[in-house]
Image: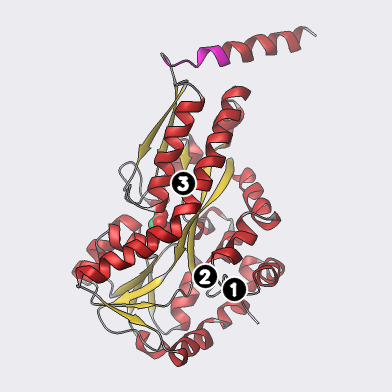
Amino acid sequence: MRTAAALAVSTSFLASAASAADPIIIKFSHVVAPDTPKGKGADKFKELAEKYTSGAVKIEVYPNSQLYKDKEELEALQLGAVQMLAPSLAKFGPLGLKDFEVFDLPYIFPDYDGLHKITYGPIGKELLDKLGEKGIQGLAFWDNGFKIMSANSPLHTSDDFLGLKMRIQSSKVLEAEMNALGAVPQVLAFSEVYQALQTGVVDGTENPPSNMYTQKMHEVQKHATISNHGYLGYAVIVNKKFWDELPADVRGNLEKAMTEATEYANGIAKQENEKALEAMKAAGKTEFHEMTADERESWRKALLPVHDEMGERIGAELVKRVQQETGAVN
Ligand code: LMR
């Protein structure tokens, strides 16, 4: 009884301790530009979270790898140096969460509707729940979009990749994807890609248009193929201990803000990518190639075997469930 009372007192003390004068600070670090689906989602979350908590929580958003690069940001979250991130789903493998690489399989999602069957469904929830074992609380999935391939030489058929050095995120599935095309994959932090392309450390890369445009990669890539061969999106995550120790009312308001910010971010992602593609076309530095049916077939033939090849790593059962749910591969 005494313990329960003490707990109630300490919880209410914590709740009242968080005020606009002495707010709880949440550092939200990310690696992309503010003017991207993720950047805008983070800013929307800040706006809503500060509003719903009446200023008792202050969200500090650090874009463009200002605080941490890809690998460091996950370590910083686990150590509690930063409280919130939204890493790409392709970056959870090095934490030991190989299942997340299912999102990287080529052609696994036919479109955003197919993707949402996973990210808003039971499989998405199971994946977010797995983060708990790493001291991480998964809050939501945020969309970016479907990737296009770029290089300084045309990429029409799958044979055009032979020997090209291609930058990838830290995912074994993406490594297998590039190997299947005969390219040489190279993992680089997102913040290093522009310079690596500019100096010729790598020949090309893959990105949703919004990332390519906001990092100015189109200025250092002569060719791009609108392949939509794979997906890139995010899990919004927080340090679990920090989250669990928040006063319940504050956490509730943050959850509400996250639900609405997710709706907003996922509502703008497709359009943001379309706008970025148009802007890059208008800039006239990169030649954008629309694939013919035969070219698409040559890519699919080269890339679909990656599903079986990576089944053991990701979990064959999970790959099958996602394939069945999205109907992408038949
Ligand atoms: C990348 O490294 O290419 C992306 O994960 C960057 C991002 O966060 O969208």
Q: Residue at x 52, y 67 (%)?
A: 104
Residue topped by disc 3: 74
Mark 2, secondary structure of its residue:
helix
Task: Residue 134: name its quadrant.
Answer: top right
Q: Quadrant of ligand 1?
A: bottom left
Residue type at mark 3: give it: Leu
Residue type at mark 2: give it: Val
Dot 2: within a 10 Å radius of its alpha carbon, few (fewer than 14), some, or many (20 or more) residues? many
Ranked by sequence position, the earlier of labels 3 and 2 is 3
Residue topped by disc 2: 173
In the figure, 322 relative to 255: above or below?
below
Question: Which quadrant is the N terminus positioned in?
Answer: top right
The one nearer the camera, 46 or 131, is 46
Q: Which residues are magenta?
A: 14-20
- The span from disc 3 to disc 2 (Cα, nearest Å) is 20 Å
Q: Residue at x 47, y 49 (%)?
A: 265
Mark 3, secondary structure of its residue:
helix
Residue topped by disc 1: 310
- The span from disc 2 to disc 1 (Cα, nearest Å) is 7 Å
- The span from disc 3 to disc 1 (Cα, nearest Å) is 24 Å
Which percent across, then down, holds residue 288?
30, 78
| Pointer 2 with pointer 1, Cβ within 8 A | yes
Dot 3: within a 10 Å radius of its alpha carbon, few (fewer than 14), some, or many (20 or more) residues? many
Mark 1, secondary structure of its residue:
loop
